[in-house]
Amino acid sequence: MEKKIVIVGAGVAGINAATKLVDNGYPGELITIIDKGNDPHNRLPEEVMTGMLGAGGWSDGKLTYHTAIGGQLSKYCGEEKAMNLMDQVISNFRRFHPKPEEIFMSDPQEEPEFIKPYFGLRMFPVWHIGSNFLHEIAKTWYQYLLDKGVDFWWNTEVSDIDFTNNVILFNPLGIAGPTDTHQVKYDELIFAVGKSGIDFAQKLADGYKLPNEPKSVQIGVRFEAPQKYFQKLIDVSYDFKLYQKFDNVSLRSFCTNNNAAYVAVEETYGDISYNGHAKKGEEFRNNMTNFGILMEIKGIEDPFKWSRDVVSKLQFNGKGLYYSPSRIVSKTSEGTDVSAYQIEFLDGFKASMGKYADYVINFIDDMNKIFNFGDDWGMYIPEVKYLSPEPLVNYNDLSLTEYTNVHFVGDALSARGITVSGAHGIYVAESLLK
Ligand SMILES: Cc1cc2nc3c(=O)[nH]c(=O)nc-3n(C[C@H](O)[C@H](O)[C@H](O)COP(=O)(O)OP(=O)(O)OC[C@H]3O[C@@H](n4cnc5c(N)ncnc54)[C@H](O)[C@@H]3O)c2cc1C
């Protein structure tokens, strides 16, 4: 008997799962996808975190192609299967792309001499989809799933899940806020709420006392400078990953954007932090480069609470902070100022981050020795990756050990990127098809 599958979250993981199912003949009518955001026709460009194709599937489109990047995958299914799953995700983005011939892959091979002795460079292939194609991809992909009979419930927030009785509680979100709570039953549940559902995932994990793996702190800033200074490195690796390693702290540049590079504002737990995205097309060119400078700090007792405390201190008037020795905040791709409060001195940054602020400042100083940008740079504070609690799952189908019809995928499990999140979704779909 075919089962009713409910997918909570129409992000990268949920949509890839549904696609794998219907591609293989699973009746779309038995699949319901619930998302608190908008469908791709009504989703606004600035709705970065919620809606069809989720976070990175709407604002950025760099698909990393390596099992050591983007979170846990090969741990569950082995190296060879992991690569196969990532291939499937990339091929889905290609399949719904309006101009697949414009997708390109960067694949740096050799660490350049000039970054030594200050940095190492992590090298791996990246597929560049182009941010501004993502909206078209989302619409075509959505139509495909609708045509297959998949039922989408937009603007609908899941507020609780009864894992014992297979019941989802949800609120249709009206203009005036949540209306009454409703219920729907499932036979199999794919839980794919991503970063915007992190507090909800935490609530469930606490409520059901799901055992978690310990996580490290991932915090830093989003650095920005004119691209010309970094061009010699971009020529080697478009999405370069510089890194430095110390005893309990390692730093890496993260998610580099070039050519038409914009800083994006994220809101998590009511606090502001920063990220970046790149647009394709000459009309968006601003000749800037931005990337996160992220520290992974080991040995902090409650990394989650520590990160949240630090982030909340780095806020002013409902904004994050911006520091530059010479520049002012940049424009968004919509032509408005990036929302950030400009500070003149770094005292507050140092007081909030403690000794870890120096690691970031030294990283920038070391880059300056190589790239000679002088005072022509700025940083948006903070950038943070709250690693979701990673519940213990059965490796063959990512189901909770105590609730085997509940499958955690994407950022809600252990992913940190598009390819790995999509791969989780496909992996679970394959197990359900069996
Ligand atoms: C600005 C930005 C740029 C990024 N760029 C890249 C990149 O270039 N490359 C890369 O590999 N990764 C990137 N990422 C990370 C990547 O987006 C995520 O790893 C990926 O989207 C996770 O997929 P997911 O399906 O787990 O969650 P998401 O894609 O975030 O989707 C989760 C969905 O669940 C919905 N949801 C959440 N809670 C509820 C609820 N309670 N009820 C109903 N629905 C709910 C949300 O509306 C959302 O649509 C970026 C992230 C951001 C924020």
Image (cartoon, rainbow, N blue to C red):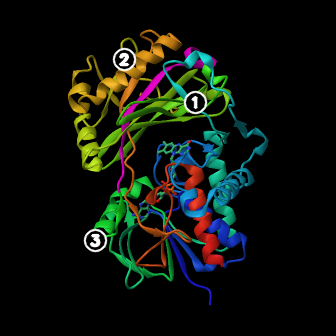
Farthest residue in the bottom direction? 1
Q: Amino acid at mark 3?
A: Gly
Picture residue at 61% right of the left edge, 74% below the top: 431
Is disc 2 surrounded by few (<14), some (14 to 19) or many (20+) residues within 10 Å?
Answer: many
Per the rendered image, the range of residues in magenta is 214-232
Q: Which mark is residue 26?
A: none
Q: Residue 297, can we see it?
A: yes
Q: CA distance from mark 2 to mark 3?
A: 44 Å
Picture residue at 63% right of the left edge, 17% below the top: 232
Q: Element under label 3?
A: helix
Q: Amino acid at mark 1?
A: Phe
Q: Amino acid at mark 2?
A: Ser
Q: Quadrant of the N terminus?
A: bottom right
Farthest residue in the front direction? 247
Q: Which mark is residue 207?
A: 3
Q: Position of residue 194 (x, y in %)?
A: 45, 56
Give the mark nearest the N terminus, 3 or 1: 3
Which of the two discs, 2 and 1, sits closer to the camera?
Answer: 1
Is disc 3 surrounded by few (<14), some (14 to 19) or many (20+) residues within 10 Å?
Answer: few
Residue occupied by mark 1: 240
Picture residue at 33% right of the left edge, 40% below the top: 272
Q: Quadrant of residue 381?
A: top left
Foreground residue, 155 or 60? 60
Q: Position of residue 278 (x, y in %)?
A: 57, 34
Residue occupied by mark 2: 324
Q: Residue 12, can we see it?
A: no
